[in-house]
Amino acid sequence: MKLKYLFPLFIVTLALMASCDEEDAVTLLQEIQVSSSYVAIPEGGGDATITVTSQDSWTAEKVLIWKNDTTVQDSIKWLTISSTRGSAGEAELTFSAPSTLNGRTAEVLIHSSGKTQRINIIQGLPKIEEATVADVNAGPDGKTFRVTGVCTAIANTQYGNWYLTDETGTLYVYGTLDAKGGKQNFLSWGLEVGDEVTVQGPKLTYGSTIELVDVTVISINKSLIKVDSVENKVLPIEGGEFTAYLTCKGQGASVDIPEDAKSWLSISSVESAGEEVVVKFKAAANAGGDRGTTIIFRTTDGKKEYTTETTLSQTGAIVDASVAEFLAAAVSDTQYRLTGVITKIDNSTYGNLYLRDFSGETYVYGIDGFREKNLKVGDIITIVGKRAEYKGTPQVGGAVLESVIPVTVSTIAEVLTKPDSDQDYYMLTGEITSITGKDYGNLYLKDGDSEIYVYGCYPGYGATGDDRKGLIEAKGIKVGDHLTVIAKKSSYKGTAQLANGIYFSHESAK
């Protein structure tokens, strides 16, 4: 099998290299032509130049791979192009690269008048290395690796998107070619979770995900143990029983429960009849947030160990958290309840916004049904969502609005006419004329001819105890600054005031 596929690959590589020497190789597009569709750069580094002839202006871009007919642009750091755009007529285009110990390839697309000319870039002969997942993660994009690991999850059975795991980590496989090199025929391999697989393909970093793309399957070693089905994959908050039905063709089966799940999950029984094994687990009641774990089942043929796995989750209580506590939490499906002020709305259709309380600020990646809720900057909202992340930046995912306290934008003069209320919040801006208490932010605000006393300006919504202190010094707020505050209207001995103010923003005096 190895000779069958590697030998043609070698012939193709030699053919591409030979075509690079053909000076008369011209792609016959009327709109744009190049002197060669293949460019070879020495393995020790250097330049190679072609001539571009175009009837109109053109642009050039580096791409690594075509992924479902979409190019991954500008992903090649080792290749330099002398120019990325040009005018009608004839121009020289030079490609440069530093030396490399391993062969590598890339593509450059030249666009003009709605047409695209593809230039294949080759530097040295690609070397396929036996590698671990850790080696792939640390390696350069575009390099071809051969990796052996266990299939731990299958995400797509048409293109063949799945996860490969070895002792050094887990890698995402995006696309699996069939035995004839065709796409979208993954099921022809009969690959199952638990099988040991050797694949080879180029590495690609797509966003923050490291992938092997359109891999060739070298070998599959079928697992001697697999999970046929499970019962109660999602357990209720009060706990219950989870059952896994296995087929085991090895010498007995063992079960691994991760250390962080042993406090709430245990094995209640194991029954076997021939190759059929039934393992039952008992989960304790859950007093915290949503939780889950991955259970690993093992067997052996006396020489080699085989594994398979399954996951289970348990519904938990919603965790009330400050923004700081939420940001410090790990990415998970645990549901958090957050309350704070909307400081900015990035998308008024989906509700992508920033939420701030006394402890910090976080990004909310959409609120279910946001458009119909008529929320605005300044409103105080309570949402429930999970701790998510995008490119290393924390965010709230899957947020649902639980409650809202509307905040009315008003002038000081308007607020002075309002009755005292424990329900209504106002947002108003004024110039600080006096600071009477720095610790808690007691101060006077003036707007035109109207002035009002602010009895407390705190760092954000939800501040209690000592968390209410220190805003004035922390923000460098001083007399003459313009302060925007959210507060309730109250009075003291007949004099109107704003009570328990929430800092929104300020503008320093010049």
Image: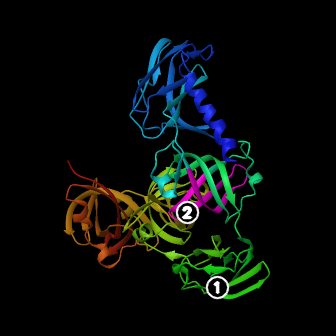
Kind of residue indicated by mark 1: Gly
Q: Residue at x 61, y 35 (%)?
A: 10
Identify the residue position indicated by label 1 in the image: 239
Q: Is residue 70 above or below residue 155?
A: above
Visible in this render: residue 56? Answer: yes
Mark 2 surroundings within 10 Å by alpha-carbon count, few (fewer than 14), some (14 through 19), many (20 or more): some
Q: Position of residue 356 (x, y in %)?
A: 41, 63
Q: Identify the main secondary structure in magenta.
A: strand
Q: Nearer the viewer, residue 246 or 384?
A: 246
Q: Residue at x 52, y 62 (%)?
A: 169
Visible in this render: residue 493? Answer: no
Q: Nearer the viewer, residue 344 or 428?
A: 344
Kind of residue indicated by mark 2: Asp
Q: Is residue 289 above or below residue 52?
A: below
Assign a secondary structure to mark 1.
loop
Q: Position of residue 42 (x, y in %)?
A: 44, 29
**Among all residues in the image, which is located at the extreme right?**
274
Task: Report whether 314 appears left or right of 405.
Answer: right
Q: Position of residue 41 (x, y in %)?
A: 45, 28
Q: Is residue 464 above or below residue 69?
A: below
Q: Is residue 129 above or below residue 428?
A: above
What separation in Å lies between label 1 and label 2 (alpha carbons)? 32 Å
Which disc is residue 447 wearing?
none
Identify the residue position indicated by label 2 in the image: 166
299 magenta-colored: no
- Residue range highlighted in magenta: 146-173
Q: Nearer the viewer, residue 49 or 497?
A: 49
171 magenta-colored: yes
Mark 1 surroundings within 10 Å by alpha-carbon count, few (fewer than 14), some (14 through 19), many (20 or more): some
Q: Nearer the viewer, residue 364 or 478?
A: 364
- Between circles 1 and 2, the one closer to the viewer is 2
Assign a secondary structure to mark 2.
strand
